[in-house]
Image (tube, rainbow, N blue to C red):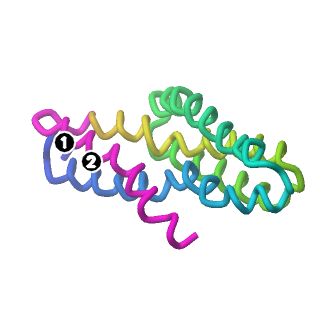
Amino acid sequence: MKEHDSLYSWFRLLIALLVATVGNIGMWVVVIILPDIQQEFTIDRSTASIPFALTMVGFAIGNGVMGRIVDHHGITKTIILAAIINTVGYIAAMQVNNVYLLSVLQFFIGFGTAASFGPLIADTSHWFLKRRGIAVALIASGNYFSGAIWPPPF
């Protein structure tokens, strides 16, 4: 049932969109808590922004590395690995008492989050021929759905 543009392809796209919407919270959560970081560590805004900067560096590097992992092991194992990386990163981030260690952890959170963007888009594109453009656009929007859905609860 691996036909391009099939009902199965659209089902995979829906699941991938849900994964992207949940998985990309790693990009947004540090922005949401930026004022809390500033207050918690009694630092200025520019220093409080370092964790976000390293999140984005981790995200950029992670897209390439996670893409290679997808090529070798498939999207499912890659998403599981990313979930483990992010879980450990979030748990460790709750325990830190300095912004620089938090920044290092945010690098890894960004790295894990990357699996829910570029590699997921690439995997989804293999399931479509006629509707590849709309499929890629929909899956890419998971990042933005994540940014629209998750900040208010936090």
**105 vs 144, nearest the viewer:** 144
Residue 3 image label: none
The three-letter amino acid code for the residue at tag 2 is Leu
Q: Which residue is the site of mark 1?
A: 134
Q: Is the residue 5 above or below the residue 37 in the image?
A: above
CA gap between label 2 and label 1 equals: 6 Å
In screen coordinates, is 107 left or right of 1? right
Where residue 29 appears, x then y in whole percent?
60, 57
Q: Which residue is the site of mark 2?
A: 138
Residue 144 among those drawn in magenta: yes
Outermost residue toward the left? 130
In screen coordinates, is 60 left or right of 14? right
Where residue 30 appears, x then y in whole percent?
64, 53
Where residue 140 appears, x then y in whole percent?
34, 43
The three-letter amino acid code for the residue at tag 1 is Ile
Circle 2 Cα neighbour tier, 10 Å, few/some/many (<14 / 14–19 / ≥20)? some
Q: Which residues are magenta?
A: 126-154
Circle 1 Cα neighbour tier, 10 Å, few/some/many (<14 / 14–19 / ≥20)? few
**Residue drawn at (73%, 42%), measured in percent from left and top?**
46
In screen coordinates, is 126 left or right of 48? left
**Residue drawn at (14%, 43%), measured in percent from left and top?**
5
**65 vs 31, nearest the viewer:** 31
**35 vs 68, nearest the viewer:** 35
**Residue drawn at (69%, 39%), measured in percent from left and top?**
107
Where residue 122 appears, x then y in whole percent?
35, 33
Residue 92 among those drawn in magenta: no
Contact? badges 2 and 1 (CB < 8 Å): yes
Outermost residue toward the front? 44
